[in-house]
Amino acid sequence: MATDATAKFQNPDFHPVSKPQDYVPTPTVSPHDGLHYWQFMIAGSIAGMVEHMAMFPVDTVKTHMQALGSCPIKSVGVRQALGSILKSEGPAALYRGIGAMGLGAGPAHAVYFSVYETCKKYFSGGNPNNPGAHAISGVFATVASDAVFTPMDMVKQRLQLGTNLHSPYKGVWDCVRKVFREDGFRAFYASYRTTVLMNAPYTAVHFATYEAAKRALNEISSEHADDERLIVHATAGAAAGGLASMVTTPLDVVKTQLQCQGICGCDRFKSGSISDVFRTIVIKDGYKGLVRGWAPRMLFHAPAAAICWSTYEASKTFFQDLNGGSNSGTVT
C-alpha cells in the first residue's frame, strides 16, 4: 500500500537539478569535535608546553623590561635588554626559570582548553560560529587556568630576574620554600586578581579573533580547507595573539611588578591594590612605564599563539582519527 501511494505522487515531469560547475560545498563545522574531555586536556597540555618552551627566551626579555629597576638591566629597548642579559650571563640566562614554566604550563593549558571547549559547546546554542560564546568561554577558561598557573608563573618570573651571583634562589623548589616561609601562601597568588583582569579581556579578544579569523580564512579557500588547515590555524592564532597582547600590556606590567616585588630592586607594595601599582609605575617611570615590554610581549604572543593553536588543532585531529572520525562523539 505504501509503495502504491509513493508511486501515485511521483511526477515524471520533475527531474533532479544538477549542481553548477563552480559549486563549492560549504564546509560543515561540528559544534563539538567528537573528543572526550580527557583528550581536550591532553591536546591543550601538549600545546601549552610546546608554546611556552619555544618562546621562553622572549618571555625572559619581556620580564626584565617590565620589572622596573631590575637587574641586570634598567633599559627599555628589546635589543638593549637582550644584549645586557647575554653580556652579563650568556645564552643560558634566557632559560632561567624554564623548569617552573614546564611544571605550570602543562596542567594550566589542560584546564584552559578543556574548560574552553566545554563552555563553547554549552554557550554556543548549537551555533559553532557564535563569537559571544567564544568570548565568554575564553573568560571562563582563563579564570580556571590562572588558578593553576599563577603560583608557578610567580616562581618563573622571580627566577628569570635573578643572576648566578645575585639570585636569592637556587632553583624552583628552593624558591617555593623561601617564598612560602618568608611571605606565606598568599604570595603565590599576589597577582591572581590582576592576572585574571588581564587575561579575561585577553582571552575574550583572543578566542573571538581566532575563531573569526579561522572562519574567514576557511571561507576564502574553502576548497583547500583540509590541505591548508595548519596554515589557517597558525595565521589565525598569530593574529589573535598579537592583537590581544597589545591591548592588555599595561595589566601585564602590573602583574610582573606584583609577582617580582622585592627581587633585584623591584618595589614592594603595601597592598595588592592594582591602582597602587599603577600609581607607582606612573610616578617612577611615567605613562610609558605602563607599556614597557609591549614589543617582546607581541613578539611572544603572536608566534606563541600560532604555535599553540596549530599544535592544539593537530593534536585534536590525531584524537579525532583515533576515535574514528571528526564527528564520532561528543564532549564527555
Image: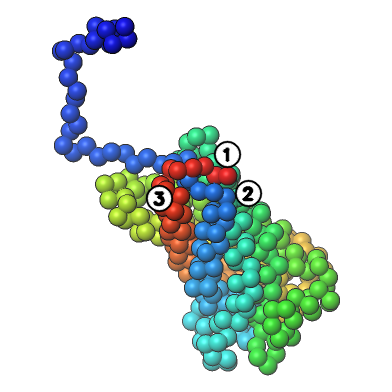
Amino acid marked by disc 3: Lys
Q: How far apart, in angstroms, are the residues tagged by discs 3 and 2?
A: 21 Å
Q: Position of residue 25 (x, y in %)?
A: 28, 38
- Depth check: 198 or 76 in front? 198
Residue 122 is labelled as 1
Q: Are marks 3 and 2 in contact (CB under 8 Å)?
A: no
Badge 3 is on which residue?
A: 214
Q: What percent of the width, then of the height, locates residue 302?
A: 46, 64
Which residue is painted at 50% across and 68% down in the image? 50
- What whole-number distance in Å separates the C-alpha atoms at marks 3 and 1? 21 Å
Q: Report the quarter where the N terminus lies.
A: top left
Residue 263 versus residue 216: which sits nearer the camera?
216
The residue lying at 49 percent from left, 73 percent from top is: 54
Task: Identify the amino acid type marked 1.
Answer: Tyr
Q: Residues within 10 Å of mark 3 (few under 14, many from 20)?
A: many
> Mark 2, residues whose alpha carbon is within 10 Å: few (<14), some, or many (≥20)?
some
Q: Is residue 118 above or below residue 6?
A: below
x and y, in percent, of residue 160 in the image: 63, 79
Q: Is residue 227 left or right of residue 62?
A: left
Residue 166: tell me if it is visible.
yes
Q: Relative to 264, is 300 on the left or the right? A: left
Mark 1 vs mark 2: give the one in front. Answer: 1
Name the residue: 80% across, 65% down: 186
Check disc 2 and give the amino acid type: Phe
Please report whichever mark, 1 or 2, sits nearer to the chain's N-terminal start: 1
Q: Secondary structure at mark 3?
A: helix
Task: Give whichever of discs 3 and 1 has the lower sequence position.
Answer: 1
Which residue is denoted by mark 2 in the rendering? 140
Within 10 Å of disc 1 (Cα), the crowding (few <14, some 14-19, many 20+) is: some
* Label 1 residue SS: helix
